[in-house]
Image (cartoon, grey):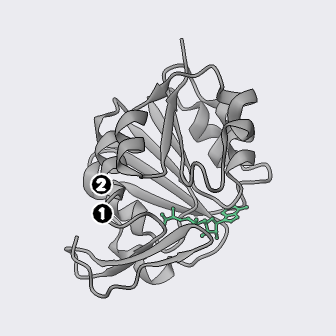
Amino acid sequence: MNDIHNTDRKVKGRFTHRFEHASGAAFIMKHERGLVKVAIDLIKSFPIELVIELGTFRGGFTKLLEDALPDTEIHTYDNTNQTASNRKYFGKNVTFHIENVLTRCNSLMELCADPRPKLLYCDNGRKRQEVAMYSWQLNKRDFIGVHDWGNEIYWNDVKDYIGNWPKVGWRALEQSGQTSRFWQKPN
Ligand SMILES: C[S@@+](CC[C@H](N)C(=O)[O-])C[C@H]1O[C@@H](n2cnc3c(N)ncnc32)[C@H](O)[C@@H]1O
């Protein structure tokens, strides 16, 4: 990943990071420069066959997921088409859905119930609601992740839904300062 410009901006505790991808396309994402690799490496180590990302924005994080997991089916959801110009650079394993995930979203519910092992990554504007609405639909041993832990979503927001799920990879994430956090649904 090569930076085109030093365009990181931190607005209300969130980063906007622009980078040039090997495909030649410029992508923008709301994940921490450099530190995002810690989260991507962790996701890469998960025994999963499916990734669901809630909150595509401009597709930057989606593209990093695709690079890390080229043989894994990736579904990314947003209620806007902000990634319109970059969608053509997504690989065949990526499906972009324009849907409101905070109302009944049938395709998302079906994906959550899919028997393949998966990660549901919550990076929409209302992570607490996403965890509340979809964590119970995941299968045993599936993973759930949230971004912006400690500045947009806190223990009190998730404890009633995934409070008894084992944490995964927290030490590396905490030590690096990266704000994604993951849990795995118990058996
Ligand atoms: C924080 S951004 C996602 C950042 C992206 N994952 C990245 O790393 O670049 C949140 C996104 O959620 C989308 N969003 C907000 N409310 C939504 C809803 N109800 N349904 C689906 N997407 C929504 C916004 O349009 C926005 O693009």
- CB within 8 Å, label 1 to label 2: yes
- Residue 92 seen: no
> Which residue is at the front of the view, 58 or 114?
58
Where is residue 139? Give x, y as percent.
57, 24
Query: Are there few (<14), some (14-19), or many (20+) residues within 10 Å of tag 1?
Result: few
- Residue 107 seen: yes
Q: Residue at x 36, y 43 (%)?
A: 175
**Number of dots carrying numbers:** 2
Circle 2: residue type: Lys
Dot 2 falls on a residue whose secondary structure is helix
Q: Residue at x 31, y 77 (%)?
A: 19
Specify whether 12 is left or right of 104: left
Check disc 1 and report the residue beneath it. 34
Which quarter of the rendering shows the N terminus?
A: bottom left
Where is residue 36? Give x, y as percent.
36, 57
Measure the alpha-carbon separation of dots 1 and 2.
6 Å
Circle 1: residue type: Gly
Residue 160 in which image quadrant:
top right
Specify whether 52 is left or right of 12: left
Residue 37 bears which disc, if any? 2
Q: Is residue 35 above or below residue 171?
A: below
> Which residue is at the front of the view, 26 or 152?
152
Does mark 1 have its CB less than 8 Å from ligand 1? no
Q: Residue at x 33, y 74 (%)?
A: 89
Ligand 1 picture quarter: bottom right
Where is residue 48? Give x, y as percent.
37, 33
Dot 1 falls on a residue whose secondary structure is loop
Specify whether 106 is left or right of 68: right
